[in-house]
Image (cartoon, helix red, strand yellow):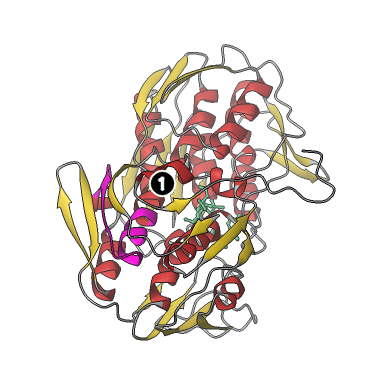
Amino acid sequence: MIRGGKKLTGRVRISGAKNAASKMMVASLLTDEKVTLTHFPRIGDTAITAELCKSFGSKLSISGETITIHTPTIVNPVAHSLSRRNRIPILALGPLLARCGKAEVPILGGDKLGHRPVDLHVSALTAMGARITEETNGYRASAPQGLHGAKIIFPFPSVGATENTILAAVLAKGTTVICNAAIEPEILDVIKLLQKMGAIIGLGANRVISIDGVERLRGAAHEIMPDRNEAVSFACLAIATNGKITVEGARQEDLITFLNAARRIGGEYEVMRKGIVFWRERALTGIEVETDAHPGFMTDWQQPLVPLLTQAKGISVVHETIYEDRFGYVRDLNAMGANIKVFSKCLVEVQCRFNGYGFEHSAVISGPTPLIGGKSAVRDLRAGMMQIIAALIASGVSTITGVEEIDRGYYAIDARLRALGADIKRVVLKTSNSKL
Ligand code: EPU
């Protein structure tokens, strides 16, 4: 429950990156030695991945923000179900095939942002010698002759498929070349860990990644990069509430496109030695934004930005080019008083791959419109953060249900927002059939 209208001010330290941490936990399956990760985020997504690793035989020890994962042997390369779902299990196929020659992982979950197929993962691993079938409860894979290098050309720089190919290639025979690879900072961070473990991975021009397979990998220690989605969320909170937040750990190099957007709408920032301070400099004005693969404006940043655009004078346009269905949350924001229309046409600059298919993937926001608190349920992780930001700038009280989805990606978000001055509390809602 959030009562809006408070300025958020103070310092917040951002956690290790969710979208690097879980991949590194999977990378630890590539060696029989210990892998230690520091700045480890204790969030829902890494808890699901810990459950996955344990089911294969990993021993995990967590102390504060440090996790050590040790998988001397893969006791069982088969995981059929987990208590919750995320996007990670399919990334374990490569490490399991390298160590056992066979693997089964559960069907994927994660945010519902469109169809989210895994065809690129499957075709890359198949080109490397894996046989993969999709069963009702998951993916079954084998590589009787082991995995070998291959040239993989992605039609789209998929983050997950690039990671999957790298994780499969590091112990494969020969060289793998990935063309049109994703090069998100979290992927480079996973590559840094793999290099420390003994892998040979080259980054070429024009999104080419080449991997020379090695015989074995060893243990290593690595500090996980800061979460740039958390950084952007807190930056948007500072600008939205007209407060001032020092985001400790935010790195300019990870946020270049966001920083430009923040300044163009009327936000301002100062880059410090160990973080970035954000505030609102002037009355907000509308802008146009197009999401894209890195180094473009990240798709996960459009949800925290849009509530600010509802407070900006004039028209803003957001063209989502990564997911075909990432504007479901607009209904909640309009119910609070926003004026947002979604279109299936590609607005802004590029005609993206969703053009002509009828997906409502462009939004036009007219502002400023006052927001009024209300009741809403969390649709997905980043939309959940959008709802928090909207509630903090709305008048009255907002009730957001299903916040455990937000916990999947943000550590103790309610406590951290309270420390910045937010009027927010986590409650268990009692319903008529509640057993509580
Ligand atoms: N795609 C395919 N075929 C594939 C793989 C992807 O068509 O085989 C399509 C997807 O349907 C989607 C697009 O490619 O339209 C992007 O998918 P990608 O594989 O790049 O994303 P992902 O690996 O599933 C990761 C993050 C997302 C983030 C995206 C884009 C993780 C666990 N998730 O997803 O993060 O939005 O990259 O940067 O790393 C979040 O943290 O809230 C989140 C959704």
Q: Position of residue 257 (x, y in %)?
A: 29, 64
| Nearer to us in this view, 396 or 370 | 396
Please tell me how crowded label 1 is: few (under 14), some (14-19), or many (20+) other residues with Cα within 10 Å.
few
Instruction: Locate residue 76: give its quadrant.
Output: top right
Q: Position of residue 350 (x, y in %)?
A: 43, 80
Asked if the magenta segment contains residue 244, the reply would be: yes
Can the viewer see residue 154 in this picture? no
**Left or right: where 282 falls relative to 122:** left
Is 323 drawn above or below residue 252 in the view shown? below
Is 86 drawn above or below residue 216 in the view shown? below
Find disc 1 in the rendering and name its residue.
418
**Which region of the structure is painted magenta?**
233-251
Can the viewer see residue 305 in this picture? yes
Total marks shown come to 1
- Looking at the rendered image, the quarter that the N terminus falls into is bottom right
Residue at 69% x, 15% y: name it: 75
Amino acid carrying mark 1 in the image:
Arg
Residue at 44% x, 25% y: name it: 214
| Nearer to us in this view, 299 or 185 | 299
